[in-house]
Amino acid sequence: MLAAFVYATDTVQIVAAYVIVNNKGKLDTELAVTGILCVVFGAIFFTGFSKVGMYILDKVDVDLDGNHQDEVETKKANDKDLTKVVVG
């Protein structure tokens, strides 16, 4: 969700930059097309990237046989190791 706000902020900034760069009421067509393509392909890239991330979280990072207890025990052991390192 934070990435969506950052992306929206960047889009507003690029539109504002076009208003500032506007040359005597006429915006360069090449600049406008480049900006639009950056926004569109950026949205496609980040959407795909988030879908891949959710797939990894849902399918790859869990025990597929349904036994989540092993995963919980492994996490507990790893967390104990981390607290030993941090606490000393």
Image (cartoon, rainbow, N blue to C red):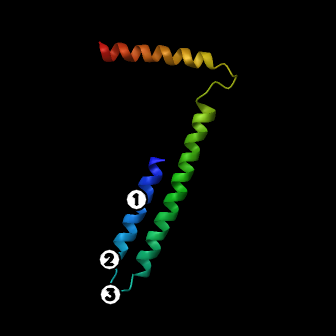
Per the model, the C-alpha gap separating discs 1 and 2 is: 18 Å
- Dividing the picture into quarters, in which one does residue 18 lie? bottom left
Q: Who comes first in sequence, dot 1 or dot 3?
A: 1
Residue at image x 52%, y 58%?
43
Q: Residue at x 36, y 86 (%)?
A: 25
**Quadrant, the C terminus:** top left
Q: Position of residue 22 (x, y in %)?
A: 34, 80
CA distance separating discs 3 and 2: 9 Å
Q: Secondary structure at mark 2?
A: helix
Where in the figure is residue 13, as x and y percent of width and height? 37, 65
Question: Viewer-nearest of labels 1 and 2?
Answer: 1
Residue beneath disc 1: 9
Badge 3, how many Cα within 10 Å: few under 14, some, many 20+?
few
Residue type for callout 1: Thr
The image quadrant of residue 17 is: bottom left
Question: In percent of the image, x 64 and y 24: which residue is there?
Answer: 63
* Mark 1 and mark 3: Cα distance apart in space: 26 Å
Q: Residues at badges 1 and 3 in contact (C-beta under 8 Å)?
A: no
Depth check, mark 1 against mark 3: the one in front is: 1
Q: Earlier in the sequence, mark 1 or mark 2?
A: 1
Point out residue 65 in the picture as x, y percentages from the top left corner.
Answer: 70, 22
Instruction: Quickly name the residue at label 3.
Output: 24
Q: Which residue is mark 2?
A: 21
Residue at the image position 40 percent from the left and 65 percent from the top: 12
Q: Which mark is residue 29?
A: none
Mark 1 residue crowding within 10 angstroms, few (<14) / some (14–19) / many (20+): few
Looking at the image, which residue sits at the far right? 65
Mark 1 touching mark 2, by CB under 8 A? no
Q: What amino acid type should be assigned to the residue bearing mark 3?
A: Lys
Q: The disc labelled 2 sits on which kind of residue? A: Val
Relative to 49, say whether 44 is above or below: below
